[in-house]
């Protein structure tokens, strides 16, 4: 069963607007971590933001914030004041301990974000 | 200053050949990984090493053999390359196995098998 679900294959947003990229996850492990990565057309994977399952507050990093709703098992990425350089693929990923190690990242299928003028 | 580096960046080879991809991290991390990204952009873990010890091997064909000579290096050797091996291979590292808040990725190696 897929553990990370990103239902939006593609999204468009106008420059300077905010956009929310959806991510839902499935795990029975009470201790897990959720990550968002950005992959621009150049191909590298850039870490954006992390949310731990026990964190009381939603994570924020500059223009990125994570809307963490634990009961709904969702970890949506919010990008405020979009810029043209935000155009990229965005991946949601999860780390849990069910495999016996907490180091494995499981990725969603990604959302391609296009920022328009 | 590159944190995680991979060589080569591009690799074009014929079916049946053997090739290697090298990875080095200068972050002092204990844990390193290999991921495969297919043509649909799906990323999947292949291997993970912690302090030179293999800890994850995700049902990868045994034509793929990782080697970690020290904790700063994790190389990937592929024997008898097949068309389906064409993908982008990412190396990554994290501080340790238990509290790996983030994994730092290398730039990727685009492997094309013809």
Image (spheres, rainbow, N blue to C red):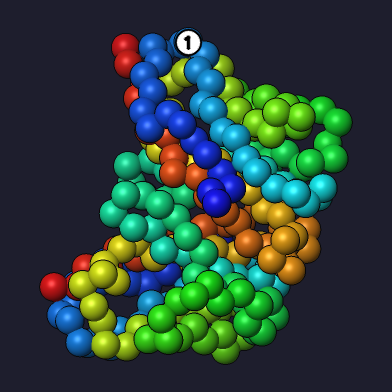
The answer to whether residue B28 is seen in the rendering is: no
Q: Position of residue A55 (x, y in %)?
A: 83, 36
Residue B38 or residue B19, whichever sits in front: B38
Q: Secondary structure at mark 1?
A: loop
Label 1 neighbour load within 10 Å: few <14, some 14-19, many 20+ = few
Q: Position of residue B10 (x, y in %)?
A: 26, 66
Q: Residue shown at 57%/89% (left/top)?
A: B69
The answer to whether residue A51 is seen in the rendering is: yes
Does residue A94 lie above or below A75 as drawn?
Answer: below
Q: Position of residue A88 (x, y in %)?
A: 39, 35
Residue A81 or residue A58, whichever sits in front: A58
Q: Position of residue A113 (x, y in %)?
A: 39, 28
Does residue B107 lie above or below B5 as drawn?
Answer: above
Which of the 4 image quadrants contains residue A51? top right
Q: Residue shown at 46%/31% (left/top)?
A: A7
**Would residue A108 appear left or right of B29 to someone viewing this image?**
left
Residue B41 or residue A7, whichever sits in front: A7
Q: Residue shown at 34%/61% (left/top)?
A: B88
In the rendered image, which residue does mark 1 sit on? A17
Q: Residue shown at 46%/11% (left/top)?
A: A16
Tell me the subunit letter for badge 1: A
Looking at the rendered image, the quarter that the C terminus of chain B falls into is bottom left
**Would residue A47 appear left or right of A29 to someone viewing this image?**
left
Disc tally is 1
Which of the 4 image quadrants contains residue B60? bottom left
């Amino acid at each position: 069963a897929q553990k990370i679900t990103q239902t939006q294959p593609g999204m468009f947003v106008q420059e300077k607007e905010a956009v929310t990229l959806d991510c839902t996850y499935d795990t029975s492990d009470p201790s897990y971590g959720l990550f968002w990565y950005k992959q621009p057309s150049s191909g590298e994977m850039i870490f954006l933001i992390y949310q731990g399952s026990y964190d009381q507050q939603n994570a924020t990093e500059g223009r990125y914030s994570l809307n963490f709703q634990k009961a709904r098992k969702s970890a949506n990425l919010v990008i405020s004041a979009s810029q043209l350089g935000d155009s990229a693929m965005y991946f949601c990923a999860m780390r849990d301990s069910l495999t016996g190690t907490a180091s494995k990242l499981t990725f969603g299928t990604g959302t391609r974000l296009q920022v328009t003028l | 200053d590159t944190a995680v580096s991979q060589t080569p960046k591009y690799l074009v080879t014929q079916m049946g050949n053997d090739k290697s991809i090298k990875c080095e991290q200068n972050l002092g991390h204990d844990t390193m990984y290999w991921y495969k990204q297919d043509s649909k952009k799906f990323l999947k873990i292949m291997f993970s090493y912690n302090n030179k010890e293999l800890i994850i091997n995700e049902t990868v064909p045994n034509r793929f053999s990782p080697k970690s000579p020290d904790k700063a290096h994790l190389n990937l050797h592929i024997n008898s390359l097949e068309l389906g091996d064409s993908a982008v291979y990412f190396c990554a590292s994290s501080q340790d196995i238990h509290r790996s808040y983030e994994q730092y990725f290398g730039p990727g190696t685009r492997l094309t098998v013809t």
